[in-house]
């Protein structure tokens, strides 16, 4: 018994039992609706099945199969409801008078034996249809159907075993996983962080936007420690760029990079700059930048502005100062310079030291007795 057979059975009951109008709709309308929904879902499933390797497996397993299972549950409930309706109709027989001769609320009559036979036939049809759904269209069946296709096997990632993927597949997989920009070896690739207040056209060797410095051919970023391998440089905005000694338009795919500190050069008006491991030239993803806060945190490893301060009451020729821990550990011991003094009183020369990649001490020798205080904005530069 197919789903279509079950639907035909429901349609036929109207003529066999003379159930018409609202009564028919009340009893069998929900059955017809549920069966039709099942039929539609099966059609969706079979269309995806026919498309082979291009079928959306996740859509089948996560959407269609659960919907079919839900309809199966509805059908089970409807069988019970129909049997209850049958019992209610049969109680119309009174004093030996057949229900055929008793008025039904909508003006129709029904023969008890005919209705009983129709209900039995419908129940069998629904049971067979529900069994067919459970047998073929469950999530497990959908998984087995698609994953068993040898031609499609290499189109899916195997999370339990090692796979031999092409560089293009590796690159596409990085985009598919949705790492939120974690695959990008470029920092501040969309030029959203500019804590120096620089320009997009700084002098050669001068840093403007965070991590970017001027270059004769545009802007340069030094990747600190790129692992050896094959990489793809991409950006938007036209022009030519350079990575691994190769200069070309975007995208640039280079093989056999030795790694370590690696220069990347792009036009000064470039945007959405990325360096992806592997061959990413065929990737169809939109630029997946990190959040602004994530970019700032990465930039802090190379450059940061801090406010330092101290206050105390000290005798003449005494020392006063404070110890400052950086919010982010620096790449190397940074160069420290005072950008602006906010306030000061009763201080001598300001000294910084010791300076490490994680903290510094700022202090002074007080020239006279009394209160002494100092605050300033300092710059920590650990760029390459």
Image: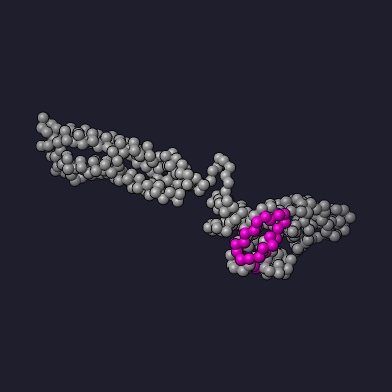
Q: Quadrant of the N terminus?
A: top left
**Furthest residue to the top?**
96
Locate residue 214 relative to residue 66 in the image: left or right. right
**Furthest residue to the right?**
317
Determine the residue positioned at 50% across, 48% down: 155
Locate residue 253 relative to residue 96 in the image: left or right. right
Quadrant in the rendering for residue 190 = bottom right
**x%, y% of residue 77?**
31, 36
Determine the residue positioned at 19% across, 46% down: 21
Q: Is residue 195 above or below residue 46?
A: below
Quadrant in the rendering for residue 263 = bottom right
Q: Which residue is more in the foreground, 356 or 50?
A: 50
Q: Quadrant of the C terminus?
A: bottom right
Q: Is residue 116 visible?
A: yes
Residue 54 on the magenta span: no
Residue 264 on the magenta span: yes
**x%, y% of residue 18?**
15, 41
Determine the residue positioned at 85% across, 59% down: 348
Locate residue 48 relative to residue 283 in the image: left or right. left
Quadrant in the rendering for residue 232 = bottom right
**Furthest residue to the front?**
151
Q: Main secondary structure of the magenta part?
A: strand
Count of numbered labels shown in the rendering: 0
For the magenta stretch, what is the residue range?
Answer: 244-268
Q: Is residue 293 visible?
A: no
**x%, y% of residue 28?**
24, 41
Determine the residue positioned at 75% across, 50% down: 358
Q: Is residue 305 above or below residue 149?
A: below
Q: Which residue is more in the foreground, 172 or 267?
A: 172
């Amino acid at each position: 018994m197919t789903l279509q057979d079950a639907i035909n059975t429901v349609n036929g009951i109207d003529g066999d039992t003379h159930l018409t109008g609202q009564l028919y709709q009340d009893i069998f309308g929900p059955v017809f609706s549920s069966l039709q929904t099942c039929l539609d879902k099966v059609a969706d499933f079979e269309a995806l099945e026919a498309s082979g390797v291009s079928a959306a497996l996740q859509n089948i397993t996560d959407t269609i199969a659960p919907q079919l299972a839900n309809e199966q549950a509805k059908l089970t409930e409807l069988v019970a409801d129909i049997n209850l309706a049958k019992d209610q109709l049969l109680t119309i027989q009174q004093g030996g008078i057949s229900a055929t001769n008793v008025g039904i609320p909508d003006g129709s009559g029904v023969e008890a034996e005919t209705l009983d036979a129709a209900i039995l036939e419908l129940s069998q049809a629904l049971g067979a249809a529900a069994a067919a759904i459970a047998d073929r269209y469950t999530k497990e069946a959908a998984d087995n159907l698609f994953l068993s296709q040898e031609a499609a096997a290499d189109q899916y990632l195997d999370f339990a075993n090692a796979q031999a993927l092409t560089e293009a597949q590796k690159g596409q997989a990085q985009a598919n996983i949705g790492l939120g920009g974690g695959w990008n070896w470029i920092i501040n690739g969309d030029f959203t962080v500019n804590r120096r207040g620089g320009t997009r056209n700084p002098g050669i060797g001068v840093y403007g936007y965070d991590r970017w410095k001027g270059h004769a051919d545009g802007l340069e970023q030094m990747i600190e420690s790129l692992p050896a391998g094959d990489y793809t440089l991409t950006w938007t905005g036209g022009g030519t760029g350079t990575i691994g000694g190769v200069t070309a338009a975007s995208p640039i795919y280079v093989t056999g990079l030795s790694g370590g500190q690696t220069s990347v050069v792009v036009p000064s008006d470039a945007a959405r700059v990325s360096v992806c491991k592997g061959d990413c030239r065929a990737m169809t993803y939109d630029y997946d930048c990190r959040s602004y806060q994530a970019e700032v945190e990465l930039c802090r490893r190379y450059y940061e502005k801090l406010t330092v301060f101290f206050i105390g009451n000290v005798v003449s020729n005494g020392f006063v100062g404070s110890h400052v821990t950086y919010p982010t550990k620096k790449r190397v011991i940074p160069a420290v310079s005072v950008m602006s003094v906010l306030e000061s009183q009763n201080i001598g020369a300001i000294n910084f030291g010791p300076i490490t990649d994680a903290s510094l001490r700022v202090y002074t020798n007080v020239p006279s007795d009394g209160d002494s205080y100092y605050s300033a904005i300092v710059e920590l530069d650990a760029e390459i």
